[in-house]
Amino acid sequence: MADREFWESRFAQEAYAYGTEPNAFVRQVAPQLPKGRTLAVADGEGRNAVYLAEQGHEVTMWDYTQSGLEKCQRLAALRRVPVTAKLVDVTRAEWPKDQFDVVVCTYLHLPAPQRQAVLSHIASAVKPGGHLVMEVFSQQQIRYGTGGPADPALLYHPAEFWFSFVSWRVKHWFWGEVERNEGLYHNGTSHVIQCWLQRPEV
């Protein structure tokens, strides 16, 4: 993830940078998720948050850009759904514990130490029995040029998930190519990691 000024500028533009529709993987698994308290982490302009609110979730959306929050609120108003949008830097946040039935996170790319810390916080924020849905660019994405960071250190290796969610039930796991058509900046064949994981009840 680049610095805040970069993202403020990107989200301040009139067009939605990654479109107004949810990430395709989020849409794919949404019908099978419990409709409870849901956190959309670093959700940019709110496309996943608003979609999940439309499906009946009680959604809180975090992002660290004011322009992103404003776009999220605009989209939620257009779709006539409630979303609680909060200005939060996930690397500095006071993360709640055992609070969310669902956590959704797409394309959150951080330096490795921060990335591991945030994955640990995400694991703690999910309630026992709750669900995590993530799609991120893998280290292979650097060869594709269809979106994501140019710095390979910001991309994910599958082992990072095995380490952070070692005892979780794997509902879906994928490492490979997908086609994405998401707004202005995610277009074409991409190499991603997808996971849908369920935290153990105890």
Image (tube, grey):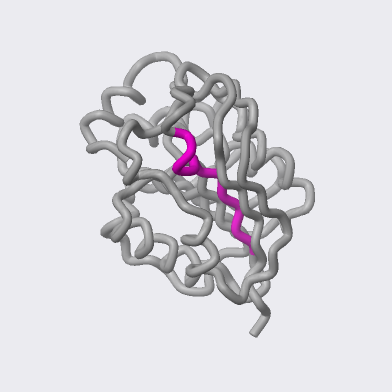
Quarter assignment of residue 55: top right
Residue reaching furthest right? 32
Q: Nearer the viewer, residue 86 or 6?
A: 6
In percent of the image, x 57 and y 46: which residue is there? Answer: 193
Q: Is residue 14 magenta?
A: no
> Can you say whether 109 is above or below 171 in the image?
above
Residue 95 vs residue 28: left or right?
A: left
> Can you say whether 15 is above or below 88 in the image?
above
Residue 181 vs residue 111: left or right?
A: right
| Residue 65 picture location, percent across and down | 31, 37
> Can you say whether 174 is above or below 163 in the image?
above
* Placement of the N terminus among the 4 image quadrants: top left
In percent of the image, x 42 and y 32: which residue is there? Answer: 142
Q: Is residue 163 visible?
A: yes
Q: Is residue 139 magenta?
A: yes
Q: Nearer the viewer, residue 82 or 50?
A: 50
Q: Nearer the viewer, residue 21 or 110?
A: 110
Disc tally is: 0
Residue range highlighted in magenta: 131-141
| Residue 3 picture location, percent across and down | 23, 37
In percent of the image, x 31 and y 60: which residue is there? Answer: 93
Residue reaching furthest bottom? 202
